[in-house]
Amino acid sequence: MTEPVSFAVHSLPEPNLAEAQVDPRRKTHGRLKMLLVLAMCVSPVVASYVTYFFIKPQGRTNY
């Protein structure tokens, strides 16, 4: 009746090497943004360890 759908790729487009080159400033800015996001995500964990191990909790109860 009807033919089954075929998902085979018979040819791929040729890569354009001019578009593949990335501007070095763009790469640097992207890495800087990634490191800033990583620092923002890690900073609460680092702050909690610093607070617990270096600024010792005194273990008293305030009523």
Image (cartoon, helix red, strand yellow):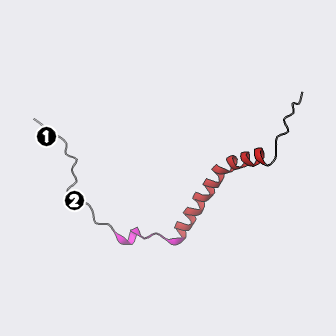
Q: Residues within 10 Å of mark 1 (few under 14, many from 20)?
A: few
Indicate the position of residue 40 as horizontal and vertical percent values.
65, 52
Name the residue: 56% across, 67% down: 28
Rendered image quadrant of residue 10: bottom left
Name the residue: 88% across, 30% down: 62
Seen as rendered, the residue at the extreme top is 63
User: Foreground residue, 60 or 35?
Assistant: 60
Kind of residue at badge 2: Ser
- The residue singled out by tag 1 in the image is 3
Q: Does residue 53 sit above or below 15 in this rendering?
A: above
| Magenta stretch in the rendered image | 16-24
Does the segment drawn in magenta span residue 17? yes
Q: Secondary structure at mark 2?
A: loop
Name the residue: 19% across, 45% down: 6
Indicate the position of residue 61 as horizontal and vertical percent values.
87, 30
User: Foreground residue, 44 or 36?
Assistant: 44
**In whole angstroms, how far apart are the C-alphas of marks 1 and 2?**
21 Å
Q: Does residue 46 sit above or below 31 in this rendering?
A: above
